Image (cartoon, rainbow, N blue to C red):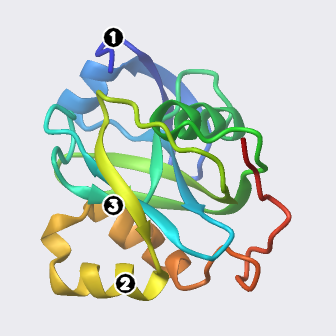
Amino acid sequence: MPQDEIVGLFDEAGHQTGSAPRSRVRAENLRHGATAILVFDGAGRIYVHRRTVVKDLYPGLRDFCAGGVLLAGESPDDGAAREVFEELGVHGVRLRPVGVRSYADPRTRFVCFQYVCTYDGALVHQPEEVASGGWMTPRELLAAVAADPADFVPDSVELALHLVSRGGGSDGAFGQDSVGGS
């Protein structure tokens, strides 16, 4: 992940207000835009991956959201499509917006544009970002987070765990109209 990316800065209302290099965003904990995409399969399972140990934020932790920072001038829809393709190879599906929420801790502050999709195609990990992964039912994921919350990315737990139980498969609250494949 290049450290010199120019990242979009956002106000609390979710509007882009400027830009800064990624290294400055991290060093000064500037509020920026980000995306989080929950990837479900047609059976309603969610994809959970382990971040690589070289990630600049929360290295080595498990995550159930793909996503990342919005580049300066990039729309949330475009950023979400770019990130889910880069990290997991997900393509050819409709990303459904499901909310905008803010997150802040001592290491990061951002406005998060959240999406869900249903994807039954082949997943391809970006080696710099994703060490491993697999499918879990919502019940399995909720139990894993409850058993060891420190093993999961804290922003995903706070911002998106409520979306996990809504499901994404044919019986899920998000519907089946976004199924893709290879």
Question: How far apart in space, not on screen, are marks 2 and 1 (Cα)?
Answer: 38 Å
Position above or below: 25 against 139: above
Give the percent coordinates (x, y) of residue 29: 25, 38
Looking at the image, residue 108 sits to the left or right of residue 83; the answer is left
Mark 3 — residue? Answer: 155
What numbered label is drawn on residue 73? none
Q: In which image quadrant can residue 167 be found?
A: bottom right
> Which mark's residue is nearer the viewer, 2 or 3?
2
**Pointer 2 or 3: first along the chain:** 2
**Pointer 2 or 1: first along the chain:** 1
What numbered label is drawn on residue 4? 1
Question: How far apart in space, not on screen, are marks 1 and 3 (Cα)?
Answer: 23 Å
> Which mark's residue is nearer the viewer, 2 or 1?
2
Inspect the image, locate mark 3, and give the three-letter code of the amino acid beneath it.
Asp
Looking at the image, residue 177 sits to the left or right of residue 166; the answer is right
Position above or below: 2 against 54: above
The local secondary structure at tag 1 comes to loop
Residue drawn where x is 26% and y is 59% of the image: 62
Q: In which image quadrant can residue 24 be found?
A: top left
Inspect the image, locate mark 2, and give the three-letter code of the amino acid beneath it.
Glu
Question: How far apart in space, not on screen, are marks 2 and 3 (Cα)?
Answer: 19 Å
Residue drawn where x is 19% and y is 75% of the image: 149
From the viewer's side, name the closer residue of 147 and 157: 147
Mark 2 — residue? Answer: 140
Inspect the image, locate mark 1, and give the three-letter code of the amino acid beneath it.
Asp
Badge 1 crowding class, 10 Å Cα cut-off, few under 14, some 14 to 19, many 20 or more, is few
Residues at circles 1 and 3 in contact by the CB criterion of under 8 Å: no
The local secondary structure at tag 2 comes to helix
Query: What is the residue that sits farthest to the right in this orientation?
Result: 177
